[in-house]
Amino acid sequence: MRTSTDTPTTIAVWPDAPKGASDGADTVQLTPFLLGHDGTHAPRGAVIVLPGGGYRMRAEHEGDPIARWVNSLGYHAFVVSYRVAPHRHPAPMQDAQRAIRIVRHRASEWGIDPDAIGVIGFSAGGHLVATVSTQFDLGRTDASDPVLQTSCRPDFAILCYPVISFIEEVHQGCIDNLLGPDADPAARREMSAELNVTADTPPSFIWHTVEDQSVPVNHPLVYARALGASGVPYALHIFPAGRHGLGLADGHPAGEWTALASTWMAGLRA
């Protein structure tokens, strides 16, 4: 079993997609960062990493380095190379949902607790985390594919300077890349995560900075209000200083988020 210190391998998220498929499904990969597992230890939790990039690209510093940090907390980790522009909704959501299903379906093989599978995302990846946290199913019992029979609901979510709303103080680049520049109000409302929160949305940890000039701090605030209104447990941390896209924020005051998130995650399993 490969460990987090080995060279990462990849798993095709859509193994039946023909090479060069016009929808780009053949390019979607799941990169595992697995901790040692010999069957003698209790199953560990796992975190699926969704980098940011405005649905235009995927930021490298919000991918593998985040997975290795997750490993340092005693969790398995997986990075998803979900589809971005020119591919549009629902492609990124489908990729993330499928990744969650794969990890849960293969949990026993990888030494994972199937009831402790979370997602973490940054910026547009945070929007994708909010999307899969509010739009999911518990498995399609009539499906012939055993992976599709598995739930795609995350058990917990970590949202880092996330895009949330597509109707209020919007990040226009995300809208253009995900829905197209001519997206109608109904489509924008459908992808505004704060409008889709229910009591079944998973517990969430959210952090942001006041100084963020790319994604207004109102985004995490409206999501937190929606979580609270639905009775969903959450932690919200707003740091006064810090640009957009800090990632782990090593050496920056906002870097405290990693310790706060670690404590929060430990509390989920207490």
Image: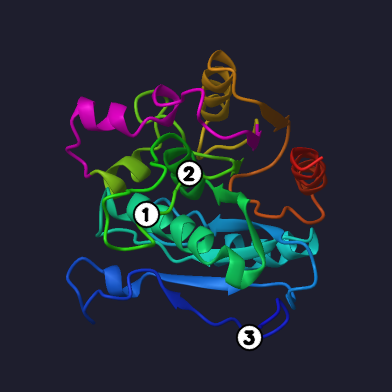
* 206 within the magenta span: yes
Which circle's residue, 2 or 3, is located before the other in the chain? Answer: 3
* Closer mark to the observer between disc 3 and disc 1: 1
Identify which amino acid the numbered label 3 is placed on. Thr
Q: Which residue is labeled 3 in the image?
A: 7
Q: Is residue 171 left or right of residue 201?
A: left
Viewer-nearest residue: 182 or 265:
265
For this orientation, the residue located farthest to the bottom is 7
Q: Which residue is labeled 1 in the image?
A: 149
Q: What distance separates the C-alpha of mark 2 from that of mark 3?
A: 29 Å
Where are the magenta residues, as a range?
Answer: 180-209
**Are circles 3 and 1 on residues that touch, CB within 8 Å?**
no
- Within 10 Å of the Cα at label 3, are there few (<14), some (14-19), or many (20+) other Cα atoms? few
Q: What residue is rendered at 53% in x and 45% in y? A: 154
In the rendering, at what x and y percent does residue 81 appear? 44, 66
Q: What residue is rendered at 58% in x and 63% in y? A: 107
Q: Quadrant of the C terminus?
A: top right
Q: What distance separates the C-alpha of mark 2 from that of mark 1?
A: 12 Å
Q: Quadrant of residue 239?
A: top right
> Is 159 placed above or below 106 here?
above
Identify which amino acid the numbered label 1 is placed on. Gln
Q: Secondary structure at mark 3?
A: loop
Q: Quadrant of residue 250?
A: bottom right
Q: Which residue is labeled 2 in the image?
A: 153
Q: Quadrant of the N terminus?
A: bottom right
* 108 within the magenta span: no
